[in-house]
Amino acid sequence: MSLAHVVPAVAPVPTFRDYAEAWLLRHRLHIRPNSARIYRTVLDLYLLPVLGDVPVQALTRASAHAVMASLADRKLSVSTIKSALSVLSAVAHDAISEGVLERSPTHGLKLKRPPKVRAIYNADQLELFLQCAQRADEALAPALALCGKAGLRVGEAMGLQRQDVDLEARTVRVERTRLQSGATGPTKSGRVRVVDLCDSLVTMLRPVVDKADPWLFPSRRGHGPIAYTFVRQAMREAARMGNLVPLSPHALRHGWASIMVKRGAPMPWVQRQLGHATITLSMDYYGSHLPLDRAAQLDGW
């Protein structure tokens, strides 16, 4: 047969299911295990049932609308729909970079998330909660106080070591977090930050630092930092003792930020304490708590 009659083989167009599976396999080596589990769940529950058999090259805006309609019919939240579209966008981004797809099916889509109401303790409730935490679990109470009085994430507080604390300078260096899996890793942003401590936190931490070796809040079942189970138990018990609504550990961080903003703390400082990448993020979360009763300052301008 002459070469003129040889027909070049055409690579089959992968379906969204095949491409998404390969995408997840490539990326799971570079993301946290919990993130990989979330992506797996989103694909299995929300995307593959709708788009699994669609060729990747055939993905269009209508494909994204089909996903949105399917999830809306199931009465799922806007947050869930946004998560599904986010994963679809990530898969499409790889397909575009490889020349498999020309344009993302989510390009230009805007889905408004309803305002999120964050349940938090006010200043008086927070003081009561931390007093009760001292009685509920004396060893763990300083970790909860670091969240409620310095804005640390609970995993960051659990991941502190003796070398991270400078009581003379009244600061802690936040460079790692205790993961749900039990391992330790970098902070959520991947950056190290130095957080200021108030006087009561310095007093509370002094005996903890003296005993630390090296973890401030060591495991009660082996090596490494303490498990999340004990944190949740301490929070439930403290809330019960104070006749307070039980909240998540992360709510202590939100409560601290809200209290600081209401007291007029500078937003750049609040941002640094929280470890937010931008001040815009801090403003989006806590800008509504800024004191607005200062019109008198304009008198005589």
Image: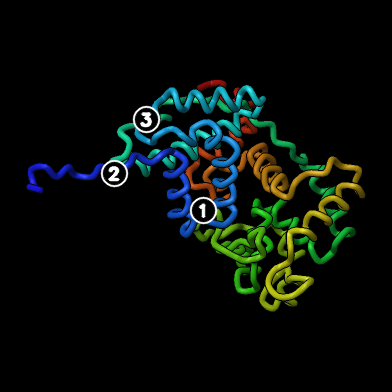
**Residue 275 at x, y percent in the picture:** 55, 51
Residue with the mark numbered 2: 11
Asked which quadrant contains residue 144, the reply is bottom right
Of badges 3 and 1, the one in the foreground is 3
Q: CA distance from mark 2 to mark 3?
A: 15 Å
Q: CA distance from mark 2 to mark 1?
A: 40 Å
Q: Judge whether 286 appears above or below 143 on screen.
A: above
For badge 3, the amino acid type reads: Ala
For badge 2, the amino acid type reads: Ala
In the structure shown, which secondary structural element does the residue marked by tag 3 occupy?
helix
Residue with the mark numbered 1: 189
Of badges 2 and 1, the one in the foreground is 2
**Residue 292 at x, y percent in the picture:** 62, 27
Q: Judge whether 228 appears above or below 216 on screen.
A: above
Mark 2 vs mark 1: which is more N-terminal?
2
Query: Measuring 50% from the left and 41% from the top, which residue is drawn there?
Result: 279
Q: Judge whether 300 appears above or below 288 on screen.
A: above
Q: Judge whether 277 appears above or below 181 on screen.
A: above
Asked which quadrant contains residue 257, the reply is top right
The colouring scheme, among rainbow, by chain, secondary structure or one colour, is rainbow
Q: CA distance from mark 3 to mark 1?
A: 36 Å
